[in-house]
Amino acid sequence: MTAALVLDGVYQHVAGRMALNDIRLALPEGAWLLICGPNGAGKSLLIRLILGLDRPSAGTIEVLGQDLSRIGDSALVRLRGDIGAVLQRGSLLADYSVLENLLLPLRNAAMTRYDMARAARLTMTLLGLDGLENHMPRALSLGQQRRVELARALIHRPRLLVWDGLSDGLDPSVARETLEVLRTLKGNRNLSLIATDNAPDALTGADDRVAVMDRGRLLFEGTREALEAAGATRLDLRVALWGHP
Ligand SMILES: Nc1ncnc2c1ncn2[C@@H]1O[C@H](COP(=O)(O)OP(=O)(O)OP(=O)(O)O)[C@@H](O)[C@H]1O
């Protein structure tokens, strides 16, 4: 079985200090991982490494079976086609309409205009964005903008979705609906998910693995049940998750 992600001994040196220390994680394809931890834990740095946007100072990173340090240019382009990413808020192009933003990942795809329009329509319906095609991003609410960012990450039918800041900009009811959509894709298409959030409860009931980071270190990785059991005895986990022992 292909692994969605394997991190082995990953270190990242940033601005004169080690911002990620010996991170080791593995996730089978089709599984969901929530990486949680307080501000500055290193979640976004890790996400950038997983997406190949930065290179680690040491260690190996495999995404969907590809070792990022050995991958050639054409394989990297193919790999990017298998990944969808939702990064920080406000990543929509302000001068492009919702539809134009949505079509960006397909600009080099070997698809007819008809098929592109169909993919856009299906993805917009999936995420409850019907009727917003011609709106400009600034005319949308934060939650709508976030859903367009998600739609843009899903339009090319990726095998792996990487979402930095899961509950960022989504109110609880929209977050629940969005999660249901993703669960459907997990069931239908075996979609893998790597998501980050400050709190551990964003994916409760849906994640397969939970990782807890603090100050560049991985404090815990395992099932949610194991996290709850570990939280009963481990002060460092409670401080990372709730800010107090
Ligand atoms: N480009 C950079 N230059 C200097 N330091 C950086 C840079 N990017 C990140 N850092 C530092 O690395 C550490 C980890 O940052 P990171 O953004 O990964 O944290 P995070 O867990 O995603 O936090 P948040 O929940 O606030 O998004 C922080 O101390 C941050 O200040």
Image (cartoon, grey):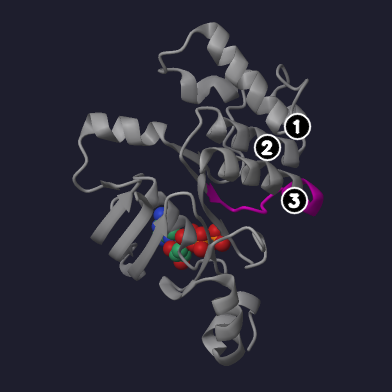
Q: Residue furthest bottom?
A: 233
For marks 1 and 3, the one nearer the N-term is 1
Q: Amino acid at mark 1?
A: Gly
For marks 3 and 2, the one nearer the N-term is 2
Calculate the distance from the C-alpha at mark 3 to the C-alpha at mark 2: 12 Å
Q: Give 135 or 15, whichever is nearer the viewer.
A: 135
Q: Is residue 245 visible?
A: yes
For marks 1 and 2, the one nearer the N-term is 1
Q: Is residue 19 visible?
A: no
The residue shown at (48%, 21%) is 106
Q: Is residue 197 left or right of residue 57?
A: right
Q: Nearer the viewer, mark 1 or mark 2?
A: 1
The residue shown at (54%, 51%) is 164
The residue shown at (53%, 71%) is 223
Q: Which residues are magenta?
A: 163-176
Q: Which residue is mark 2?
A: 147
The residue shown at (57%, 36%) is 91
- Look at the image and say whether residue 116 sits in the magenta stretch: no
Q: Position of residue 48 (x, y in %)?
A: 41, 50
Q: Vertical placement of 80 versus 214: above or below?
A: above
Q: Which residue is mark 3?
A: 176
Q: Vertical placement of 210 versus 193: above or below?
A: below
- Look at the image and say whether residue 171 sits in the magenta stretch: yes
Dot 1 falls on a residue whose secondary structure is loop
Callout 1 touching callout 2 (CB < 8 Å): yes
Calculate the distance from the C-alpha at mark 1 to the C-alpha at mark 2: 8 Å
- Circle 2: is it few (<14), some (14-19), or many (20+) Cα within 10 Å? many
- Circle 1: is it few (<14), some (14-19), or many (20+) Cα within 10 Å? some
Q: Which residue is mark 1?
A: 128
